[in-house]
Image (cartoon, rainbow, N blue to C red):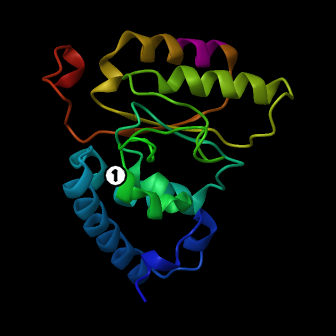
């Protein structure tokens, strides 16, 4: 039995050895390539986020610790690790699973986003709610790509996070990629 077939929730990752995790990464890549070749979707961003997604879900306890993805383009592995592997036959199809995080699909999806640079604002909002005692979250993890970090909304959120002193874990997925060339001095 493939390791991927034994994963139905993030807690299933915690007992795997380093060799198992490496094999799981390969199995997930193969699965995503096959699924996207049938239905279409975001291939490169997800293939580049496999180990990152596994590591985050192994270290943090989703959904108690929300893991948020900027643009959602790199959330396929997150969906697979949170029990939605079977739905990939209908990825981005009518009545199928979404190509982005979707709160109706899973308790592991806290936001629905497809626009770049928004995740840090969402994380700030969840952190403020947590700090006010409204939400029970412990850690809030925001994954943002280098292309999204060039958007003004990301900087506004960083400023708000700094002023509020709210604790958020920000993971910069610096893969040197974007849909179009980035044009600020941050790219160099």
Q: Nearer the viewer, residue 162 or 24?
A: 24
Percent position of residue 150, x then y: 30, 18
Give the quarter of the image for residue 124.
top right
Q: Residue at x 51, y 54 (%)?
A: 56
Q: Is residue 96 left or right of residue 146?
A: right
Name the residue at the left extreme. 181
Image quadrant occupied by the C terminus: top left
Q: Find the magenta span and give its range.
A: 159-163
User: Is the magenta region chiefly helix, strand or loop?
Assistant: helix
Q: Residue at x 37, y 60 (%)?
A: 51
Name the residue at the front extreme. 94
Q: Secondary structure at mark 1?
A: loop
Image height of 43 relative to 100, above or below: below
Name the residue at the bottom extreme. 1
Q: Residue at x 67, y 49 (%)?
A: 63
**Residue 64 among magenta residues:** no
Quickly name the residue at label 1: 49
Image quadrant occupied by the N terminus: bottom left
Percent position of residue 46, x then y: 31, 50
Q: Nearer the viewer, residue 21 or 187?
A: 21
Q: How many marks?
A: 1
Q: Nearer the viewer, residue 37 or 43?
A: 37
Percent position of residue 10, x then y: 58, 63
Image height of 128 relative to 107, above or below: above
Give the quarter of the image for residue 117.
top left
Instruction: Sort mark 1 into few (<14), some (14-19) or many (20+) by Cα contacts within 10 Å.
Output: many
Image height of 185 relative to 30, above or below: above
């Amino acid at each position: 039995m493939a390791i991927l077939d034994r994963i139905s929730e993030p807690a299933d990752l915690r007992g795997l050895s380093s060799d198992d995790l490496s094999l799981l990464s390969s199995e997930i890549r193969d699965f995503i390539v096959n699924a996207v070749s049938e239905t279409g979707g975001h291939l490169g961003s997800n293939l580049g986020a496999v180990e990152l997604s596994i590591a985050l879900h192994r270290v943090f306890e989703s959904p108690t610790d929300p893991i948020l993805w900027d643009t959602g383009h790199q959330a396929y592995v997150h969906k697979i690790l949170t029990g939605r592997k079977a739905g990939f036959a209908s990825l981005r199809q009518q009545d199928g699973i979404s190509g982005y995080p979707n709160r109706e699909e899973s308790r592991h999806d806290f936001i629905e986003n497809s626009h770049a640079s928004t995740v840090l604002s969402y994380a700030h909002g969840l952190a403020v709610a947590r700090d006010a005692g409204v939400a029970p979250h412990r850690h809030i993890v925001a994954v943002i790509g280098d292309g999204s970090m060039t958007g003004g909304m990301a900087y506004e959120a960083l400023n708000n996070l700094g002023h509020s002193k709210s604790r958020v874990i920000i993971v910069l997925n610096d893969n040197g990629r974007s849909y179009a060339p980035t044009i600020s001095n941050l790219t160099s």
